[in-house]
C-alpha cells in the first residue's frame, strides 16, 4: 500500500513539473525554424551565460531564468515571446512566469537546445 502512495506522489510531482502554464504553447524545434525570421516575435534564451556563450541561436537574447523576473519590464508585451533553454524545463518555467505577468503569446521550445540541429 505504501508503494501506491509513493507512486501517486511521484506521478503528481512530475505532472505539475511538466504541465504547461495557461496561455503557453509548446512548439518543436522544427516549428521554431519557421519562426526565426519573424519580426513580430522576441526570442529569449533562459540558460546561464556560460551555456549561451558555448552555443546559441543568433536570434535569441540571453536572459537567464533567475534574472527574468527583474528584466520582464525590458520585454515588449505586445509581441509574442519564444523561450528556449537546454532541455525545455527552465524555458517552461520562464514561459509560466511570462504568462502570469500578462504576456499573451508565449511559446516554449520543447526539447530546447538539446534537440536543435
Image: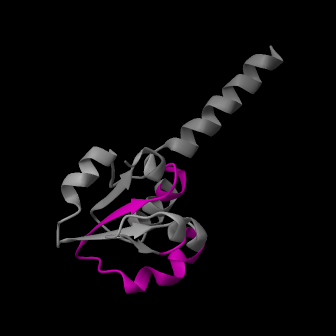
- Image position, residue 62 (x, y; %): 46, 74
Furthest residue to the right?
2
Pick the front one: 65 or 96? 65
Residue 114 part of the magenta-drawn span: no
The residue depicted at 53 percent of the width and 83 percent of the height is: 70
Residue 89 falls inside the magenta stretch: yes
Closest to the observer: 113 or 16? 113
Q: x, y percentage for residue 57?
A: 37, 64
Range of the magenta residues?
63-91
Quadrant showing the N terminus: top right
Identify the image quadrant of residue 9: top right
Q: Which residue sits at x=45%, y=59%?
A: 96
Instruction: Give the residue at x 52% y 54%.
Output: 86
- Residue 23 in picture, x, y percent from top left: 33, 55
Count of numbered marks: 0
What residue appears at the point 23 percent right and 62 percent down from the top-left corner?
36
Instruction: Work out whether 115 lies above or below 38.
Output: above
Amino acid at each position: 500500500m505504501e508503494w501506491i502512495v509513493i507512486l501517486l506522489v511521484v506521478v503528481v510531482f512530475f505532472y505539475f513539473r511538466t504541465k504547461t502554464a495557461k496561455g503557453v504553447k509548446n512548439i518543436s524545434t522544427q516549428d521554431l525554424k519557421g519562426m526565426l525570421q519573424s519580426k513580430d516575435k522576441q526570442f529569449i534564451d533562459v540558460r546561464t551565460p556560460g551555456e549561451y556563450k558555448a552555443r546559441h541561436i543568433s536570434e535569441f537574447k540571453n536572459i537567464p531564468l533567475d534574472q527574468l523576473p527583474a528584466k520582464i519590464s525590458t520585454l515588449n508585451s505586445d509581441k509574442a515571446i519564444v523561450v528556449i533553454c537546454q532541455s525545455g524545463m527552465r524555458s517552461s518555467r520562464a514561459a509560466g512566469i511570462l504568462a502570469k505577468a500578462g504576456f499573451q503569446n508565449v511559446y516554449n521550445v520543447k526539447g530546447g537546445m538539446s534537440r536543435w540541429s
